[in-house]
Amino acid sequence: MKGTEVLSLWKQGRGPQVEFVAERTTSRALAKILAGMANAEGGTVLLGVPLKTHAIAGVAGLRDPETALDMALQAALICEPPLIIPLPRIVALDDAQIVIITVPRGLPHVYAVEGRYMERVGSRNEKLSPLKLRRLLIGRGDVSFESLPAKSASFQDLDWDRAQRYAETTGLLPGISVEELLRKRGCIIGDDGVPTNAGILLFGRETERLIRTAEIIVARYAGRTMSDSFIREDIRGPLPDQIRQAEAFIMTNMRRGANLSALEREEHPEYPPKAVREAIVNAVAHRDYSTQGDTIRIFMFSDRMEFYSPGKLPGHVTVTNIVDERFSRNEAIVQVLADMGFIERLGYGIDRMIQLMRQDGLPAPQFKEKANGFLVTLYGHGDQFLATPDVPGGWAHMGLNDRQKMVLVYLTEHQRITNRECQELCPDVSAETIRRDLADLVHKGVLLRIGQKRATYYILK
């Protein structure tokens, strides 16, 4: 670290990721600061800078830099488990010398000092609450939620017919029982065959009763933002069924373009289906199932699809290195889904998603870590999706009449249309003819009908 970088930290002042520590501190007190930073977002300690110093010129520096350096190393070893960090360094500031200790972000463990778990909050350390500690242990991989026994679950809570089909389809480990296969896959534990959370998520009879937030909410909106015009489905049950149902919803509600090739009409979807499946599987396989009050959400808009999964990126994975690094929060779930064919190559879903989108002439997916989750966004062609001079949306070859074309033109400027609005577009046409026109557009997969009776309206599919 250069002197200019130290000056930058100085100007930043004390906070969650910067601390000034006087030379007279003890290795144990320093260890508590380092452990608190390690359990939060990392940080930097300037050893040899008194807390009351407000100007860089007032720093006398360390009387014995080598002893301070040894104390920094000892403090890291006092942590439980020992804190493995970059070697502290002696840095010169004008005529003074201080020791810089760097605690990286995203370390693999949760650290304690004298049996106490702390985290950095503001400019001080605070004791981790039991809930925060549990979440941190799971997030860091020290404890896996999927491997814990499911609360109030018994041997009978597993669908053994489903498990038998899994064993027969995969052809894994011939000569052993289905029960032993599930044991080897981490789905049951103990002599009584108690289901783990992974077992319930993959093979449970009533998954939502035992793990309530294990569901997917998927919705299709008419425009680029959330509005009152939408179709929604709440998907529950074992994870393999959730993946299939979410994929079916998206493919049913995805726009399709049309063109003529060899005098035949060909359709192709707005997004590559395999990229959509990768995004769904990624959300299901890697979400944090210990998080309560949140669930997977998949929202379809006219220009993009968003896949939100509860739980921040696990382990050492960041948005920057997500393409190259591999870390699985749910090893058992990932392995079983791979056995079932949902994951073609373990650890390569992100790469494959990027490749499929680019092959289809679309932007690479965008990845963003939210406060308590992870968001993947697939951008489509938007309003330019196979538009033709005749009819917006690429439906010029479907034999639409002039009234139906007027409806589609109207929907390019408005999010929805009602029967009354259709009649206003064509005042000389009977209500029955308008009804048949709209029903035909629904039948051809151009429009979606939402609502019943007088509350009925239509949106572009």
Image (cartoon, rainbow, N blue to C red):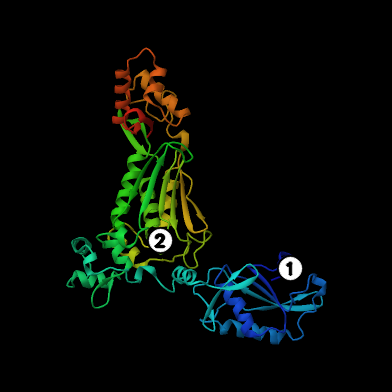
* Residue 41 falls left or right of residue 204: right
10 Å neighbourhood of mark 1: few (<14), some, or many (≥20)? some
Question: Is label 1 in a helix, a strand or a loop?
Answer: helix
Question: Is label 2 in a helix, a strand or a loop?
Answer: helix
Q: Position of residue 27 (x, y in %)?
A: 64, 85
* Residue 20 falls left or right of residue 176: right
Q: Amino acid at mark 2?
A: His
Residue position marked by numbered label 2 in the rendering: 286
Direction top: furthest residue: 428
* Residue 318 falls left or right of residue 263: right
Location of the C terminus (image quadrant): top left
Spatial CA span between label 2 and label 1: 39 Å
Residue 93 to residue 430: above or below: below
Residue 431 to residue 203: above or below: above
Residue position marked by numbered label 1 in the rendering: 10
Q: Amino acid at mark 1?
A: Trp
Query: Taking the image as drawn, is residue 230 in sight?
Result: yes
Q: Which residue is drawn at the image coordinates 41% and 51% (left, top)?
A: 297
